Image (spheres, rainbow, N blue to C red):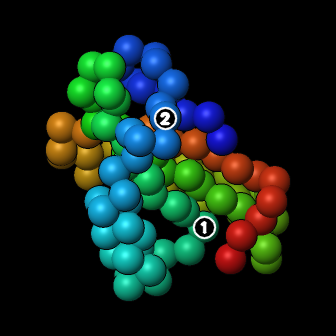
Amino acid sequence: MQRECSKCGEPFAARDLVKDRSKEMEAERKAKGMQGVRFVEYTCSHCGQDDIFVDILQLDNESPEEFQVRKATLEADLKQLHGSQAEVVLKTRETGRHP
């Protein structure tokens, strides 16, 4: 999946991935039992913008309608929690379901 900076639009390269922070967020997600989402952080090498990508993934046992409800709830919750300098970018993947 190609990701772009939310500020300048430049595509992120592998070197832009903030591996430690991404692993930390994923560990927190797993510890809290959150399923159907994935967190990845990038810092743009062009403009310095920090972007946290939240991929919302459809679960194997989830109907399309249930997925849409969960997605809308997650989007609303994440927008309210946004307090860092990083921009939160939400992505949806309805195909390729994940646990």
* Horizontal side, residue 20 vs residue 39: left or right: left
Q: Quadrant of residue 61?
A: bottom right
Q: Residue at x 18, y 44 (%)?
A: 84
Residue 63's disc number:
none
Query: In the depicted view, which residue is nearer to us: 1 or 56?
Result: 1
| Amino acid type of the residue that numbered disc 2 sits on in the rendered structure | Ala
Task: Specify which label sits upstream in the sequence, 2 or 1.
Answer: 2
Determine which quarter of the picture holds residue 39: bottom left
Above or below 79: residue 62: below
Across and down, in percent, residue 44 comes to 34, 29
Q: As drawn, is 85 to the left or to the right of 19? A: left
Side of 63 relative to 40 (left or right): right
Which residue is at the far left?
84
Q: Is residue 69 visible?
A: no
User: Which numbered disc covers residue 13?
Assistant: 2
Residue under the point 60% across and 67% down: 36
Tell how many labels. 2
Residue located 70% across and 50% down the image: 93
CA separation, marks 2 and 1?
25 Å
Residue 40 is left or right of residue 67, and the answer is left
Q: Quadrant of the C terminus?
A: bottom right
Q: Secondary structure at mark 2?
A: loop
Task: Estimate the x, y position of residue 14 in percent, counting from the top left.
Answer: 49, 42
Closer to the camera in the image, 63 or 16: 16
Q: Which residue is mark 1?
A: 36
Q: Secondary structure at mark 1?
A: loop
Q: Amino acid at mark 1?
A: Gly
| 43 in relation to 76, above or below | above
Q: Position of residue 22 (x, y in %)?
A: 37, 60
